[in-house]
Image: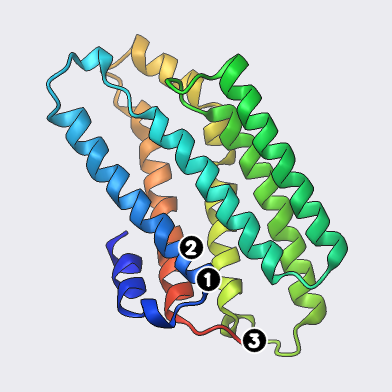
Amino acid sequence: MIVPIIIGTIKFTRLDLPRKLIWYLMIYTFVTELCSIYYLDYYDVPAESKNNTPMFHLYSYLEFGIMAFIFHRKSNDSLWKSVIKLMSFVFYIFSICNLIFWESIWNFNSNQRFVEGVFVLIILIGFFVQLMRDVEDIYFERNSYFWLAAGFLIYFTGTLFVFLFEKKFMDYWIAAPKEEFVDYYGYIHGVIFIILLIHYSIFLWMKEQK
């Protein structure tokens, strides 16, 4: 995630609001990763007591909020803007209920991540429909928001069901910690997240089309 942070830092004064929000999200992600590494590897507490899931919960709130704001701002369809607002409201209400009744701040938020993934995919489908309907230039790769949306699409499609079934895999991991193949969750998420970071970098580097 260093590359998009560097690009955003170099071009910060020329970034519009959506790009600054993505840059801020990358800064938060980078800081939380450093804190997680220190906490999990160096903090002097029993291993079974170490838990960094609260940062995951906060990340989901920030990620969805930024994504919804960006594509709401980009849309020129008043009805679709209202749909995005409704989905945002439902997502945050569900997230609070999930926190209270099902997955506490100390549990991995797989329910929330699944609902987020579904809503994000719906918003992205709406964006691509509007892009194909309204764009005059057939070369979509010239549109920076195409790259951002494509990155989100790859990431959330690839991780949607992984997040849904994460707790089952984690239960198996606890039952059989020596089985190497259960690490695939981290590998899959890591690879897809790298792809998302590449798209973030392209989005931050390109200028917004007028």
Three-letter code, disc 3: Tyr
The secondary element bearing badge 3 is classed as loop
Residue 21's disc is 2
Question: Which residue ends up furthest to the top in the rendered image?
Answer: 175
Image quadrant in which the C terminus is located:
bottom right
Toward which corner of the image does residue 11 lie, by quadrant? bottom left
Is residue 38 visible in the rendered structure shown here? yes
Which quarter of the rendered picture does the N terminus lie within?
A: bottom left
In-image side of 162 versus 51 (left or right): right
Q: Give the foreground label among 1 and 3.
A: 1
Lower position in the chain sequence, tag 3 or tag 2: 2
Measuring from the top left, give residue 45's x and y in whole percent.
Answer: 16, 17
Q: Is residue 21 above or below residue 131?
A: above
The residue that disc 1 covers is: 17
Q: Hey, what amino acid is under mark 1?
A: Leu
Q: Residue at x 85, y 65 (%)?
A: 78
**Given this view, does label 3 or label 2 mark the residue nearer the observer?**
2
Q: Which mark is residue 48?
A: none
Q: Is residue 165 above or below residue 89?
A: above
Q: Which of the 4 image quadrants contains residue 202?
A: bottom left
Q: Disc 1, disc 3: CB below 8 Å?
A: no
Judge whether 205 appears above or below 103 on screen: below
Near-viewer residue (30 or 188)? 30
Q: Which residue is mark 3?
A: 139
Distance from disc 3 to disc 2, alpha carbons, whole Å, reads 26 Å
Local packing at callout 1 (Cα closer than 10 Å; few below 14, some 14-19, many 20+) is: few
Q: Residue 26 in the image: state x and y as whole percent.
A: 38, 57
Report the side of 59 relative to 111 (left or right): left
Q: Residue at x 48, y 73 (%)?
A: 203
